[in-house]
Amino acid sequence: MAGYIIRRLLWLPVILGIVSFATFSIARFGPGDPVSIAAGQLRDPDVLERVRAERGLDGTVVEQYLRWLVGDLYPGGSGSGAIRGDFGESFIQQGFSVNELIRSKMAISAQLGFLTLVTVFSVGIPLGLLAARFNGTWIDPFVIASLLFLTSVPVLVIIPPALWLFASQLDLLPVGGWGGEGLDGIFDIWWIGGVVAVPIPDPHIYLPLLVLSIGGFAGVARLVRITALEVLSEDYVRTAHAKGLKETTVAFKHVLPNALLPVITVIGFALVGILEGAFFTETLLGIPGIGRFAFAAVQSRDYDVILAITVILSTAFVLANLVVEIAYTWIDPRVRLGEAINA
């Protein structure tokens, strides 16, 4: 297993190099360049050329990319370079490093994404087992059809009525925003007698959590249902029923562990979504996460920010893929690393 992990990790810089160079090239060949956009109304050619030289944006695309990648290790480069975690300075928000700008925003999206992930799987897995258990009755199609209906409703359609109902009419939830930084964005502290501190969920998390979770239940439930139906037809499940075991015992000790194997793949790649954030949800609800920030960076053509987000998410995707394959071998010994490689 160690050799397999090492071989996969050796591919990581190759994949990230291709992705980052492609993104870098598209940004440079797009309309306008970072210096002209940041200059605004300034159009003095001599000044622009001097700024390009100072920012390492003169020369060919390959030379510019190498300066961005390795920093001062390449002639004309500055800083540590992206390969050492230094993504440079924002072209739009001058004076702020890219790392400084995206760190807090990724933390907020990670908090919201983690809560969404827990909610989706906590609800989707039991509903999938319920549908499989009552296969052939009205409960099965009712559960799946209801979830598919919720999935078919776009986020842009869900948010306005949710705001109107919960924020405007019932006045139960805030219109938007986020509670604060760190865990302050998730929990408020309720003091009992000024002595005992009880953490309670911050009101700001309910509306985005509802909007982001409601469309994910169907995918998890359908996957669990299909896998559970296959497991229910196995001999060992019929033997467990013949022994007179309780239905809950059969479901949780025999069906559930074997039905969760395909779900691991979904969980693994859903972890990447924790960093991605939700572009529309964060933008419409005023949540200062990485999704809203990336959307603003694309609009303002803040190229170094776009590059940093692309590289970070690409790294997370590749590592999630590796974690999923390793988890397969731990949970199900029948899955061989050799088979995974050939696939």
Image: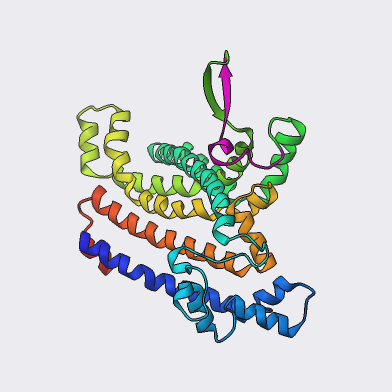
Residue 30 at least partly seen:
no
Residue closer to the observer: 280 or 50: 50
- Residue 57: x, y in percent? 59, 79
- Residue 190: x, y in percent? 58, 22
Left or right position of 135 against 21: left
Q: Is residue 153 magenta?
A: no
Residue segment shown in magenta: 175-192
Residue at 40%, 71% in the rendered image: 15
Left or right position of 283 against 107: right
Residue closer to the observer: 53 or 234: 53
Residue closer to the observer: 90 or 1: 90
Residue at 23%, 61% in the rendered image: 337
Residue at 64%, 63% in the rendered image: 297
Left or right position of 17 against 160: left
Q: Is residue 187 magenta?
A: yes
- Residue 176: x, y in percent? 69, 42
Looking at the picture, does residue 209 appear above or below residue 301? above
